[in-house]
Image (cartoon, rainbow, N blue to C red):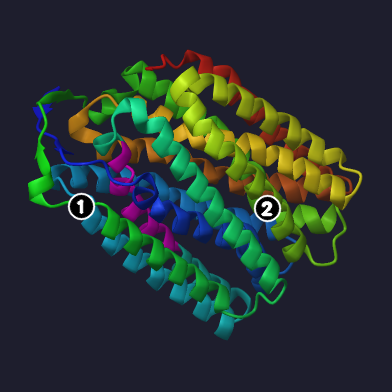
Amino acid sequence: MTSHTSRVRTGPLPSPWMLSAFWFGTAFLWLMLLTIFMPAHVVGFMGAEDKGKWLGLLGAIGAAIALVVPPLVGAHSDRTGRRLPYLKLGVGLNVLGLAVMGAAVALLAGSTGFWVYLLGFMVVQFGNNYATAPYSALIPQLIPPEQRGRYSGAMGTLQALGQLLGAATGMAIGSRYGVSIPFVLMALVLLVSAFTTLRGVTERADVLAPAPSGETLPWKQLFSHAPFKWVFITRVMFALGQYSVQPFLQYYAGDVLRQKDPVMSSSLMLACIVVASIISAIVGGRLSDRVGRKPVIYFAGTVMTVMALSLLVAPSFVAALALAFCFGLGFGAFTSVDWALGADAMPSQSSYARDMGIWHVAFVAPQFVNLPMGAVLDWGNRQSENFGYTLVFGGAALFFMLGVILVRNIPERR
């Protein structure tokens, strides 16, 4: 182990809403891109027969980038002692990638358009992960443990609001996915949210001071630190459940619920999830500061498990909307507490960005499940009508339940 000096804020705490504003833009981006428009674009480029495979390929490539970039950029951020310059550069690259994707949709077709689209998506993934790894360190670096639930709740609320705006935008645009306007909107919201955080969080020398030296675990030994290990593992389980279903929700709306406009219908389902998650995120973060993080996770994971299974037997689109709303109650409670639980688990003040970057891998590496789940979806549907959705949604429920079971191993710090 080595000792390092960390820099922490000594002045007033930043507003939780300004600090978390960038998560609003990021949530808007990923919901719009991954859940509403990317599935439609894949069908537009490559056809519907193997849509699960091609969509899964995009998710897996994105996950590979997200697996490598955050730990490396986070470690570099710890050495420089800066967070916000990475946010600026990452957002710039993100916007560039969106421009490439938009150009591919507007100007190209077939496999040529798909591969240009993929190139733009890779730049988006690189830029966003370059920005968020150091940015993720700001809550544990600046916020004392007894207030992290409140800040995590604000972050969860802003994420949910960003997703709600994304779902509303998807409903407004509907099936007119052949135009590039969604990419303009994603870039604009991302830039405004990043600017808000940059204005609200100060990184000047006069408000930063050396913190007491502390031991830093080598990254290979991070998983010997029990809180970090179990927070990482349980986060992977919940993310596997989320990414088993989320990319294919639009296909579910069309194939299972028989909706004429799957883009519009899946956007409405997402809106129900997000509205409910806003309600539970506001309550969940503050509640976790009083009763602890794990009871909230138990509730959230159980609700998500039950609702994932219930969607398989939804008798109508209206019933599916009601189930989506209930799922959102669990999802919002989870996101409101998740970040606080992760911040509590960091082993050292002097490697916040590196460790949060490694923990961030638990959010994004499970996107690899898109590829096998896409293949399972296509295979199952060829065996029997919509059997693939039974396999995919059942797998998601299993992952959620494993997360609930394993979270009991986290030695929570109150």
Q: Which residue is mark 2?
A: 270
Q: Please check the rendered image and state whether residue 128 is part of the magenta-colored stretch, yes or no.
A: yes
Q: Is residue 57 visible?
A: no
Residue 190 located left or right of residue 255 = left
**SS class, disc 1:** loop
The image position of residue 61, as x and y in percent, is: 48, 54
Assign the N terminus to one quadrant of the image.
top left
The magenta segment is 122-139
What's the amino acid at mark 1?
A: Thr
Q: Which residue is mark 1?
A: 202
Residue 233 located left or right of residue 207 = right
The secondary structure that dominates the magenta segment is: helix
Quadrant hosting residue 260: bottom right
Quadrant hosting residue 143: top left
Q: Residues within 10 Å of mark 1 (few under 14, many from 20)?
A: some
Q: Is disc 2 in contact with disc 1, using a CB cutoff of under 8 Å?
A: no
Quadrant hosting residue 406: top right
